[in-house]
Image (spheres, rainbow, N blue to C red):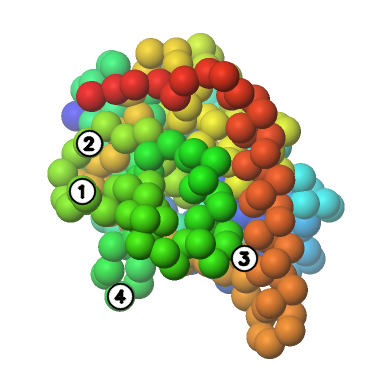
Amino acid sequence: MFHVSCFMLLSIIITSYKNPELLKVCIDSVKRNIAITDCEIIVSDSETGEDTEMLMRENFPEIKFFPFDENVGLARLVEVAYETSRGDYLLFLNGDVIVKKGSIEKLLEYVRDNPSVGMAGPQLLNFNESLQFSCYRFYEPMTIVYRRTFLGKLGFAQKHLDSFLMKDFDHKSIREVDWLMGSALMIRRKAIEKVGLMDLRYKLYFEDTDWCRRFWEKGYKVVYNPESQMYHYHGRGSAGQGVLKTLLSKKLAWVHILSALKYFWKYLGKPAPKHS
């Protein structure tokens, strides 16, 4: 089905942050459920602890591993791994994703067979097999307001948020979308060479929104493909109990708002790309 390129067919780049247990499950799922042999795995990890270093050294010595002492942000993790990658196609995975058998091949085959597609993402599932929303319409300023204030409970706001989450779509068919959650993305290298990597100005949130928007602006389609399915352990950024959970959630909310301000300022006066 696949031919060997002058470089390598596929690079799988896994980014992680302070969770070696999930990272191990992620890597094991990739190695167990992929049939492609012309590929490499690269792991890039923020705020790396001794347990993560030990995991990579003892369990996966063959994998390229880039640890960082600080939390450098997703965009920087992606950049460092990309610079050493050799694949004509790249699968970017968060360390909290578990791939299903055949899911990588289906995404790769779809992108390869559709040259106008620069980026494709799978259907993400919770561990109980329920749907996890992972494709969206572009943010508007009021999207942030409705998501972060009591106004979100009002009828008109809920209608707006349902549209943002694409709840008018059954998520069972392949579809062009504004943007995809960055947890699992298959991208052709030629597209990245034209579009560029994630914007390093975002440390958390909006890296994926911004990236997808730039793909559209450069003439590449962004596609949701539910024929490929992966599990995603979503929401662990607010892990904790009681006061700690509340404080962390508020901190993440403010980070989200600050990233939104950077995004809207960057595209001030620029209409969002249109597609079918």
The residue at which mark 3 appears reads as: 237
Disc 1 to disc 2, how far (Cα)?
A: 9 Å
Disc 4 to disc 1, how far (Cα)?
A: 21 Å
Q: Quadrant of residue 236?
A: bottom right
Q: Quadrant of residue 50?
A: bottom right
Q: Residues within 10 Å of mark 1 (few under 14, many from 20)?
A: few
**Circle 2 — which element?**
strand
Could you tell which of marks 3 and 1 lies nearer the N-terminus? Answer: 1
Could you tell which of marks 1 and 2 lies nearer the N-terminus? Answer: 1
The residue at which mark 4 appears reads as: 128
Image quadrant containing the N terminus: top left
**Circle 4 — which element?**
loop
Discs 1, 2 touching: Cβ within 8 Å = yes
Disc 4 to disc 2, how far (Cα)?
A: 24 Å
Could you tell which of marks 3 and 4 lies nearer the N-terminus? Answer: 4
Please, what is the three-letter code of the amino acid marked with disc 1? Phe
Q: Which mark is residue 175?
A: 2
Could you tell which of marks 4 and 1 lies nearer the N-terminus? Answer: 4
Please, what is the three-letter code of the amino acid marked with disc 4? Asn
The residue at which mark 1 appears reads as: 169
Q: Nearer the viewer, mark 4 or mark 2?
A: 2
Image quadrant containing the C terminus: top left
Q: Quadrant of residue 269?
A: top right
Compared with 122, 96 (above or below) is below
Q: Residues within 10 Å of mark 3 (few under 14, many from 20)?
A: few
Please, what is the three-letter code of the amino acid marked with disc 3? Gly
